[in-house]
Amino acid sequence: MTAPPEPAAEGPTATRRAIPEASVARLAVYLRMLGELAEQGAETVSSDELAVATGVNPAKLRKDLSYIGSYGTRGVGYEIAPLRHQLEEALGQNHAQSVALVGIGNLGHALAGYGGFSGTGFPVTALFDVDPDLVGIHINGILVEHVREIPRVCAERGVTIGIVATPAPAAQTVCDQLVSAGVRSILNFAPVVLQVPDEVEVRKVDLAVELQILAFHVARRHLESTVNGHAVNGAGGLLS
């Protein structure tokens, strides 16, 4: 009889399959939760425990972790420290990141002042705007510079990720400047679709669209409760 194949080895030498984008998003959630568990002193976690903590089906969680070559140990679960290391490697967080934020309006100012980026390995190291009232001030110890300085500053500080938080009309120009400066990953908060070369990855965050999606779910639940209410009342009338 042929022996069953051994599980894939864990760690950076494991053979990795292409990771679906939906799984990548969940891997980031698992990593955040593992960090919280580690802060609480935990050393291991079962797939069921991690699934409950992250709101994911346990089978889906195990499938996601299999993409990075991690299968856990029966009866023990996953060792948190090695699993965090694997996730950080898979998500590119084992490399130094440097973030530039362009657009220091209300949203941009809030993002610039948010301390959570550095804590997760994404320090904001450069801020840009065109408003003379903003250029020259410091936010969280970082000087706000004019957008014309994007090429120089991004090169000097090794910026790897750009955040665009400008009004829509300025977003494409700013994006072009970041791309010309060598930035290949952009998070876009502007309500516009950015045109970029194939080698540049853009993630769009449209808060208005997200609110519209939530409004859809609110309306759907209201409709369902209304329909169910009529159904119950109708049934009651038939039985009375």
Image (cartoon, rainbow, N blue to C red):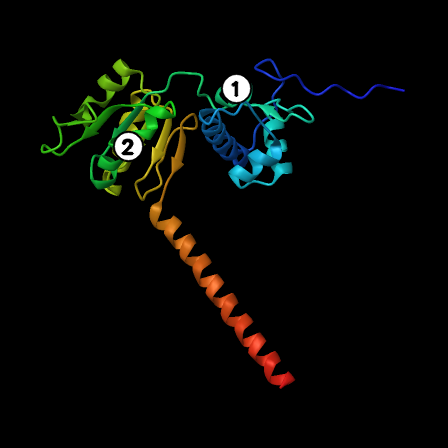
In-front residue for pair 185/10: 10
Please report the residue visible at 40 percent of the width from the left and 57 percent of the height from the top: 215
In-front residue for pair 54/186: 54
Q: Quadrant of residue 234?
A: bottom right
Name the spot of residue 11 as percent of width and height, x first: 58, 16
In-front residue for pair 189/6: 6
Name the spot of residue 231 as percent of width and height, x first: 58, 75
Which residue was labeled with disc 2?
114
Depth check, mark 2 against mark 1: the one in front is 1
Q: Quadrant of residue 135?
A: top left
Q: Residue furthest right?
A: 1
Q: Quadrant of the N terminus?
A: top right
Report the side of 19 relative to 40 (left or right): right
Residue 46 image label: none
Report the side of 113 relative to 196 (left or right): left
Q: Amino acid at mark 2?
A: Tyr
Name the spot of residue 120 as percent of width and height, x first: 38, 25
Density class for disc 2 (Cα within 10 Å; few <14, some 14-19, many ≥20) is few
* Element type at mark 2: loop
Q: Quadrant of the C terminus?
A: bottom right
Q: Quadrant of residue 182?
A: top left
Q: Amino acid at mark 1?
A: Ala
Residue 81 image label: 1
Q: Residue furthest front?
A: 41
Please report the residue visible at 43 percent of the width from the left and 25 percent of the height from the top: 199
Q: As displayed, is residue 231 above or below residue 45?
A: below
Name the spot of residue 236 as percent of width and height, x first: 60, 81
Density class for disc 1 (Cα within 10 Å; few <14, some 14-19, many ≥20) is some
